[in-house]
Each structure stands twice: as C-alpha cells, then as structure tokens.
Amino acid sequence: MTGLRTSQVADAAGVNRQTLRYYERRGLLAEPDRSLGGHRLYPAETVTVLRVIKAAQRLGFTLDEVADLLAAGGHRHSGPDSGLRDRARVKLAEVETRIADLEVIASTLRAAVAAGCDDLVACAGEPCCPIPFATIASTPPAAGASDATGR
C-alpha cells in the first residue's frame, strides 16, 4: 500500500494534523486507507484538495460552502446553479456589500480622528460628533451580521 502519511500531507499543505482529521469528520476529505500498522495513508491529490479548501476559505467561503463546491465539482450532472461560477458570483456580491459597509465605517472613523474625538462618552453627547452613536444604537444589525466577537 502506498500513500502519504498524515504528517507528510499536513506539512505539504501547510495545515496541522488535527485539520486533516476534522476535514475527514466533516466529509471534506475521504477517509484514507490504512497501512498494516494502522497509519493513515492519503493519496497524493489530498494535498491539492487541502490547498483548494484553504484557498476557498481565504476567498470567504465557509467550510459548508466549500463542501458543497467539492461535491458539485465531483458530480458534473449537478444543476446549473451548483458550480463555482454561480457560487462565486454570490460570494462576490456578499464581499462587495461588506466592502461598502467597511468604506462607510472607515469614513466615519476618519471623521472621528479629524474631529479630535478622545472621549467616547463625551463625544457621543456632542451634536458635532461624527460618529452617529444614536443611529447605530437604534438600528438593528443586518441579518447575518456579527458583533465584534464574531458571533
């Protein structure tokens, strides 16, 4: 039996060993063969799959979305909206929305710096405060938005 051992795959792909096992449990990687001694033996293309997964994550795809993309790629008979191009269009729209939001945030923070705001509470009470505290506090977060802790 031939194949790459866990440490070889992890090193080649730039991930840790626990990542391999986690991806196996999530179904992103097929369960590897085992050596007579019980060691996992991965096919060489596992390194490529891992690199693709990590690249997709850097592009903003969640692991669930990556799993769907991998499954769609393996089944050419999937529907017209199941491929990378359509999913990339959706992800691009999400990223562009986030960029627009971040541009508003950056502009507001630049104004706060230019206005010399040093005290959060004192600034919030001033009518010339560039940060719209009252508006922000009364506006519910957008669907899918997270707080500063990422939740």
Image (cartoon, rainbow, N blue to C red):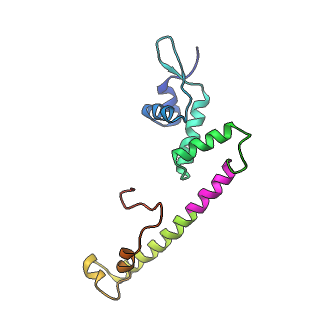
Q: Nearer the viewer, residue 141 or 34?
A: 141
Where is residue 105 shown, x and y percent of the image?
44, 72
Is residue 129 placed above or below 21 in the rendered structure?
below
Quadrant in which residue 122 is drawn: bottom left
Was residue 101 drawn as part of the magenta stretch in this picture? no
Assign the magenta stretch its main secondary structure: helix
Q: Residue furthest bottom?
A: 127
Residue 36 in the image: state x and y as whole percent. 50, 11
38, above or below 61, in the image: above
Name the residue located 48 percent from the left edge and 26 percent from the top edge.
Answer: 6
| Quadrant occupied by the N terminus | top right
**Which residue corresponds to the image point at 39% horizontal and 56% vertical from the top-left?**
150
Q: Is residue 125 visible?
A: yes
Q: Provide the residue span drawn in magenta.
A: 83-95
Q: Residue at x 53, y 43 (%)?
A: 54
Q: Is residue 47 left or right of residue 138?
A: right
**From the viewer's perspective, is 104 left or right of 90?**
left
Q: Write the residue at 57% across / 65% down.
A: 96
In the image, taking residue 120 as reference, residue 140 lies left or right, namely right
Count up the numbered dots.
0
Res 28 quadrant in image: top right
Q: Position of residue 110 (x, y in %)?
A: 42, 76
Quadrant (top left, top right, bottom left, bottom right) of the C terminus = bottom left
Asked if residue 119 can be seen in this view, the reply is no
Looking at the image, is 66 positioned above or below residue 102?
Answer: above
Instruction: Provide residue 32's location: percent of width, then percent of height.
Output: 54, 23
Q: Residue furthest top?
A: 36
